[in-house]
Structure formats: C-alpha cells, structure tokens
Image (cartoon, grey):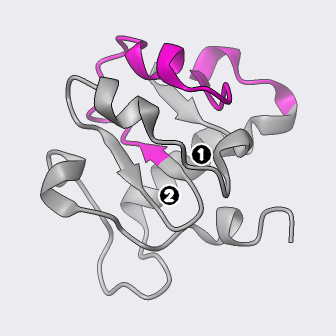
Amino acid sequence: MTFVVTSACIDVKDAACVGECPVDCIYEGDRKLYIHPGECIDCGACETACPVEAIMNAKLVPAAEIEFIADEERFFHTVLPGRNTPVGDPGGAGRLGPVRADTPFVAGYGR
C-alpha cells in the first residue's frame, strides 16, 4: 500500500516531502500535492518530512480522510479540469512539472 496526501496539505503545499522522495513520485496540483500510487516505493521518507503531517500510509488514513485514497488515483487517471488528457504515468514529477490543476474533490474541498 502506498502513502497518501490528506487534507492538511490543501492550500499549504510545504513541499519538504518532494526533496525527500527518492523516486520523484510527488506531483504538484493547484491546491495540494499528490503521491503517484504506482510510482511510490513505500519508503516513508515523505511522511517524516511533512511538517503538517498531511502524508500517511494508506492503511492508517482515518475514516474522515478516506476519500483522499481514491482521490490520489483520480488525480492521475482522470482528465482534470483545464487538461485534455490524464496525468497518467509520466515517470516522475520533475519531468512533468506543476500540473496546476486538482481533482474536483480537492478543488471544492472546504469551500
């Protein structure tokens, strides 16, 4: 099981986790960061680097945050607002750069 970025990251995006990820699997959306579930190697480096405790093992996500698990998948495999194709499997966030879009779930979260 992979790691998941939860609501504490929304509108914060500290990004300390990005520099700690050895496989470059943390992608930048407009309001939050997203961990690619197919690229994550479950090392946990991002979790310990996150100053707002937004990142957690998917097995430990509390019930109130459970939707973020499915939402990580949606970020990569559905067409996001303002884009023509899904993010997909680019093989690293550095190759793609900031996506500048979020899933509808995150875009509307807390608003």
Viewer-side residue, 12 vs 23: 12
Q: Is residue 92 visible?
A: yes
Q: Position of residue 8 (x, y in %)?
A: 72, 40
Give x and y (percent) for residue 101.
Answer: 48, 73
Q: Secondary structure at mark 2?
A: helix
Region of the chain picked out in magenta, as a range: 34-63
Would residue 53 be counted in the magenta stretch? yes
Q: Mark 2 sits on what residue?
A: 74
The residue drawn where x is 46% and y is 59% is 75
- Residue 39 figure quarter: top left
Q: Is residue 40 visible?
A: no
Q: Are marks 1 and 2 in contact (CB under 8 Å)?
A: yes
Q: What amino acid type is highlighted by mark number 2?
A: Arg
Neighbours of disc 2 within 10 Å: few (<14), some (14-19), many (20+)? some
Mark 1 belongs to which amino acid?
Ala
- Indicate the position of residue 103 as horizontal and vertical percent values: 57, 67
Closer to us: 37 or 50 = 50
Q: Helix, strand, or loop for circle 1?
A: helix
Asked whether, in this view, residue 71 is left or right of residue 89, the answer is right
* Residue 33 appears left or right of 95: right
Residue 70, disc: 1
Residue, x 38% and y 57% (percent of image)? 76
Please tell me in which quadrant of the rendered image residue 45 appears.
top left
- Out of 46 and 36, give the one closest to the viewer: 46
Q: CA distance from mark 1 to mark 2?
A: 6 Å
The quadrant of the image that shows the C terminus is bottom right
Query: Residue at image x 14%, y 46%?
Result: 91
Q: Is residue 82 magenta?
A: no
